[in-house]
Amino acid sequence: MFGDSDRAHQAEKMTIRIREFSKAPAVGENVIRRILWLTPAFGIAGAAAAFLFRRLDWAGGLLAGAGLAWLNFRWLHRGLKSFLEDAAMTPNLAARPGRARTYVTALFRYVLIGGSVYVIFVYLHFPLVSIVTGLCALGAATLAASLWEVAESRS
């Protein structure tokens, strides 16, 4: 009898630890949150600089590119999260439902971004280089958020 109550007590302690651990943010969650707000911030800063130089076409292209980069990252994050949740629920690869849907959604994301760049370039007449530079806001945000995380972990 003594062993059963001791096991129950140990199981209760483990359950409490698991609950406390599940409340903690996932690894990299802070970086993802920073990327999500730094990407438009870099796009707005670049557009403001272009506006100061009286290049409204460049300002629009930078904003459009940064907006597309932000959407791309959100869709990529959501798709990866969905894919990982499906993998955790069903370890058997053949039994996973909706695998084709995940791949089609990923392909659709790139088609939609390419089509958006084409429409912005052809109909709004923003310079293609400004749109591509705006898309680079995601890379700059990723680098800044990662360096921020490293610097924060050292202090």
Image (cartoon, rainbow, N blue to C red):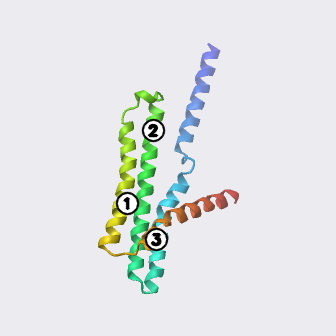
Q: Which residue is mark 3?
A: 43
In space, the residues marked 1 and 3 are separated at their CA atoms by 19 Å
Q: Nearer the viewer, mark 2 or mark 1?
A: 1
Q: Horizontal and vertical percent for residue 154?
A: 70, 58
- The quarter of the displayed image where residue 12 is located: top right
Looking at the image, which residue is at 45% across and 81% down? 50
- The quarter of the displayed image where residue 99 is located: top left
Q: Residues within 10 Å of mark 3 (few under 14, many from 20)?
A: many
Q: Amino acid at mark 1?
A: Gly
Q: Amino acid at mark 2?
A: Glu
Earlier sequence position, callout 3 versus callout 2: 3
Label placed on residue 85 = 2
In space, the residues marked 3 and 2 are separated at their CA atoms by 32 Å
Do tag 3 and tag 2 residues touch (Cβ < 8 Å)? no
Q: Nearer the viewer, mark 1 or mark 3?
A: 1
Q: Horizontal and vertical percent for residue 7?
A: 61, 21
